[in-house]
Image (cartoon, grey):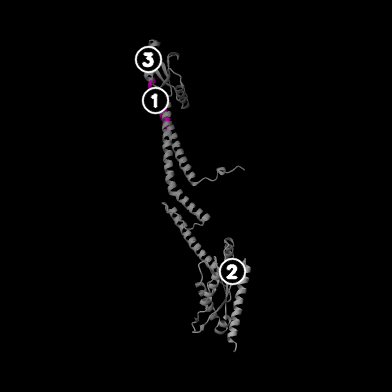
């Protein structure tokens, strides 16, 4: 099947279509109007030339009357040459009463212009002009003239030149009108298409279509901008909801600290950086001592207040780059990164323990005395990967918890 027109080069743009339409209409209208005017003028000129040729024939008949009566062919020949030179006559004959040629004259020259004139005269149906030669009211002969068509040829050539000039002017006017229409119609549509592409490919919903001059296109642009406003509001709301969901998925709802999933991801990245830089880091495990007793004695609401306050106190002790997370229940963890020595990690554990141990007064007036067992594990000494470091920190925390229980038991033992 043959391809559709223009398929080989892709679809035409609206700019091309408008340019071609304006230029084509201007040229066709001018060519049609000019051709009709040229034909009408040519017909009127044919009638006019025919009338002039008949008038010339009567004048020649009156002038050569004496030469024909007195049979002076030479005088008749001279009269024809004198009268018809430059009168648009190609050939003239004087015939006597018997129809025999008494004298004749023919225009000299047979160049291309003469041949073109003769051909044009034949095409438009130019006929001979004849006039009787009268002597005493009796016809003694006849004059026959044939036009050379030069007048019509000059008219046609000048008419074609004027037609070409008018066509060129019409084409220029058509192009000017096309550019104006492009500004009023095509340019706003192109702006709308450009914004639509940016929204589609780049998600640039912040762009807007500039106002157009035409009321219909302005209304279209306003509706499109209103749609973009709505889309931008929905995208902003969606991003806000996504951010909230992401935060909820990676943070503990009670304390606001990162949850276990966020903690493990952060720890993996911190270990990768420590491996790459050859720098030490530390992991601290915290377990709230006596948390079950708080829940059992004062209720879960009091336990929640305690956990939230512990989280706040832990967060307040962190250095830039450190991360505190709630792993679940009453367990917390702190990742100390970047580079951390054993002394710095122990100092952090001491500060955390001191901060957590500050008394906490509940809204009911009950005063709690929090305490936490904190275990420290160093990278790479106690663990070269996440699992090993977690085990080491957990074991260190339980070691501290056991030591504190023994110390408390010794304190309470009778002496």
Inspect the magenta stretch and tell me whether residue 387 lies in it: no
C-alpha distance separating marks 2 and 1: 124 Å
Alpha carbon separation for disc pair 3 and 2 = 136 Å
Q: Rounded to the nearest whole Å, what is the CA distance between mark 3 and mark 1?
A: 21 Å
Tell me residue 101's x, y (percent): 44, 14
In the image, the segment drawn in magenta is 40-57
Q: Tell me if residue 52 is in the magenta stretch.
A: yes
Q: Earlier in the sequence, mark 3 or mark 1?
A: 1
What kind of element bears circle 3?
A: helix
In the rendered image, which residue does mark 1 sit on? 51
Q: Characterize the local packing of mark 3: few (<14), some (14-19) or many (20 or more) Cα atoms within 10 angstroms.
A: some
- In the figure, 38 relative to 397: above or below? above
Locate residue 135 relative to residue 360 in the image: left or right.
left
Look at the image and tell me in which quarter the C terminus lies: bottom right
**Which secondary structure class fits the magenta region best?**
helix
Residue 122 at x, y percent in the picture? 47, 25
Q: Earlier in the sequence, mark 2 or mark 1?
A: 1
Q: Is residue 52 above or below residue 7?
A: above
Q: Which mark is residue 103?
A: none
Please name whichever residue, 177 or 190, is drawn nearer the observer in this view of the structure: 190
- Which residue was labeled with disc 3? 79
As helix, strand or loop, the secondary structure at mark 2 comes to strand
């Amino acid at each position: 099947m043959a391809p559709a027109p223009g398929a080989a080069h892709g679809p035409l743009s609206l700019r091309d279509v408008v340019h071609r339409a304006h230029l084509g209409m201007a040229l066709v209208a001018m060519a049609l109007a000019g051709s009709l005017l040229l034909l009408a003028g040519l017909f009127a000129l044919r009638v006019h030339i025919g009338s002039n040729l008949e008038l010339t024939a009567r004048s020649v008949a009156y002038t050569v009357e004496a030469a024909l009566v007195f049979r002076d062919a030479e005088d008749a020949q001279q009269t024809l040459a004198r009268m018809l030179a430059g009168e648009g006559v190609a050939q003239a004959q004087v015939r006597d009463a018997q129809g025999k040629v008494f004298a004749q004259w023919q225009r000299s020259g047979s160049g291309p212009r003469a041949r073109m004139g003769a051909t044009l005269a034949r095409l438009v149906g130019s006929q001979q002009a004849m006039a009787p030669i009268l002597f005493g009211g009796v016809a003694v002969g006849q004059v026959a003239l044939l036009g050379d068509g030069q007048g019509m040829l000059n008219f046609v050539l000048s008419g074609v030149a004027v037609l070409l000039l008018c066509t060129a002017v019409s084409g220029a006017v058509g192009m000017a009108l096309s550019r104006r229409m492009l500004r009023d119609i095509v340019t706003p549509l192109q702006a709308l298409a450009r914004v639509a592409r940016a929204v589609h490919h780049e998600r640039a919903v912040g762009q807007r279509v500039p106002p157009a001059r035409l009321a219909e296109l302005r209304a279209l642009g306003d509706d499109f901008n209103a749609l973009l406003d709505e889309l931008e509001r929905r995208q902003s709301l969606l991003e806000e909801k996504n951010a909230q969901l992401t935060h909820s998925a990676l943070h503990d709802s009670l304390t606001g600290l990162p949850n276990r999933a966020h903690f493990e991801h952060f720890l993996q990245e911190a270990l990768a950086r420590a491996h790459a830089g050859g720098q030490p880091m530390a992991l601290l495990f915290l377990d709230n001592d006596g948390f079950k007793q708080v829940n059992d004695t004062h209720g879960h609401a009091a336990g929640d207040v305690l956990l939230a306050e512990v989280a706040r106190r832990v967060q307040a002790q962190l250095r830039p780059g450190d991360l505190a997370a709630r792993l679940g229940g009453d367990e917390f963890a702190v990742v100390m990164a970047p580079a951390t020595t054993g002394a710095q990690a122990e100092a952090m554990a001491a500060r955390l323990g001191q901060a957590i141990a500050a008394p906490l007064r509940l809204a009911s007036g009950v005063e709690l005395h929090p305490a936490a067992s904190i275990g420290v594990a160093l990278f790479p000494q106690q663990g070269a990967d996440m699992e090993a470091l977690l085990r080491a920190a957990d074991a260190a925390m339980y070691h501290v918890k056991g030591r504190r229980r023994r110390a408390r038991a010794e304190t309470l033992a009778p002496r």
